[in-house]
């Protein structure tokens, strides 16, 4: 499973979201089969075409465009519990 963590600049916030998504995947016992990548909005448009899931804010979700990936809006990038719950349906067997 490929996951793209997206913020506007692709520097700090997306890296924080990437790290917390990796924690969430470990909690879901899905980390062995997942790869999480941090990206800015411009890079994410291309990366999302080959991703299974995109994690981003409500402000950026529409900017990703029409992609086959499931776009999940995360309200609080530091809340591992929120990320875990929102990722759960994507990693459930």
Image (cartoon, grey):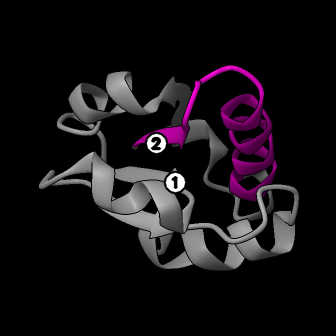
Residue 21 drawn in magenta: yes
Residue marked by disc 1: 55
Residue 31 lies left or right of residue 82; in this view the side is left
Q: Is residue 71 above or below residue 23?
A: below
Q: CA distance from mark 2 to mark 1?
A: 7 Å
Residue 13 drawn in magenta: yes
Decide which of 18, 6 is in the foreground and name it. Answer: 6
Residue at 50 percent of width and 61 percent of height: 59
Residue marked by disc 2: 3
Decide which of 4, 62 is in the foreground and name it. Answer: 62
Quarter of the image for the N terminus: give it.
top left
Question: How many circles with numbers are drawn on the protein?
Answer: 2
On the image, the x and y values in percent for residue 84 come to 71, 69
Residue at 29 percent of width and 48 percent of height: 64
Q: Residues within 10 Å of mark 2 (few under 14, many from 20)?
A: many
Q: Are marks 2 and 1 in contact (CB under 8 Å)?
A: yes
On the image, the x and y values in percent for residue 76 come to 78, 66
Q: Is residue 12 above or below residue 1?
A: above
Residue 25 lies left or right of residue 63; in this view the side is right
In the image, the segment drawn in magenta is: 2-25
* Residue mark closest to the camera, 2 vs 1: 1
On the image, the x and y values in percent for residue 75 come to 69, 71
Residue at 86 percent of width and 66 percent of height: 79
Q: Quadrant of residue 7?
A: top right
């Amino acid at each position: 499973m490929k996951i793209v963590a997206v913020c506007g600049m692709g520097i700090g916030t997306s890296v924080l979201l990437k790290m917390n998504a990796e924690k969430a995947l470990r909690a879901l016992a899905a980390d062995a089969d997942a790869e999480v990548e941090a990206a800015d909005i411009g890079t994410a448009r291309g990366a999302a075409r080959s991703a299974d899931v995109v994690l981003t804010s409500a402000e950026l979700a529409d900017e990703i465009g029409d992609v086959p990936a499931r776009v999940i809006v995360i309200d609080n990038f530091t809340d591992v519990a929120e990320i875990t719950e929102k990722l759960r349906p994507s990693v459930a067997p």
